Amino acid sequence: MSCQHKDLSAGRWSQLLFIEQMANIGSEVERALNWRIKKNADYAQKAFERALELIDLTLESDKNYAHLKEIARMREAIVDYFFGTNQFMSSESSWRNYFMPFTYASRRNH
């Protein structure tokens, strides 16, 4: 997997607030879900890979244990939803509902 967010991986990502990071991850997940609905597996895959890249950047940059635990569990569940057996019983709406508060909070801060 190649690096899609070169400017973010160069250090700018760690300067964002946690809610901004989560909102950006949510945007990529939203894109993946939308492309999945449109039956465009290639675009859905690429959006999902970008989301994973942002999740991993968050795991690398965040030092808050509670955040790390949440992000790691979310990563596990989202990979399971898109490519596993969906053992966590996630749904499209559950992922949209998970990320929505981060998007609202991020917009309120600006």
Image (cartoon, rainbow, N blue to C red):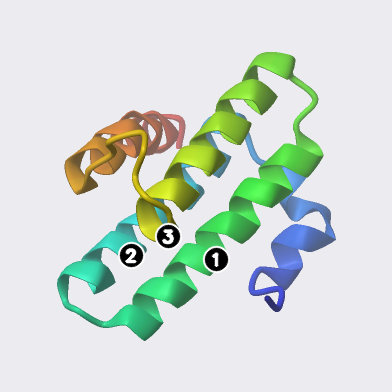
Q: Secondary structure at mark 1?
A: helix
Residue 31 in picture, x, y percent from top left? 33, 65
- Quadrant placement of the C terminus: top left
Query: CB atoms at circles 3 and 2 under 8 Å apart?
Result: no
Q: Residue at x 38, y 57 (%)?
A: 82
Q: Give the image quarter of residue 109.
A: top left
Residue at which label 3 appears: 83
Measured in 3D between alpha carbons, the distance from the residue under mark 3 to the one under mark 1, in whole angstroms, is 15 Å
The amino acid pointed to by label 3 is: Phe
The amino acid pointed to by label 2 is: Arg
> Given the current orientation, which residue lies at the most extreme top position?
66
Looking at the picture, does residue 103 appear above or below residue 67?
below
Q: Earlier in the sequence, mark 3 or mark 2?
A: 2
Residue at which label 2 appears: 31
Q: Give the image quarter of residue 105.
A: top left
Q: Secondary structure at mark 3?
A: helix
In-front residue for pair 8/68: 68
Query: CB atoms at circles 1 and 2 under 8 Å apart?
Result: yes
Q: Alpha-carbon neighbours of circle 2 within 10 Å: few (<14), some, or many (≥20)?
A: some
Q: Which circle, 3 or 2, is nearer the viewer?
A: 3
The amino acid pointed to by label 1 is: Arg
Residue at which label 1 appears: 50
Q: Earlier in the sequence, mark 1 or mark 2?
A: 2
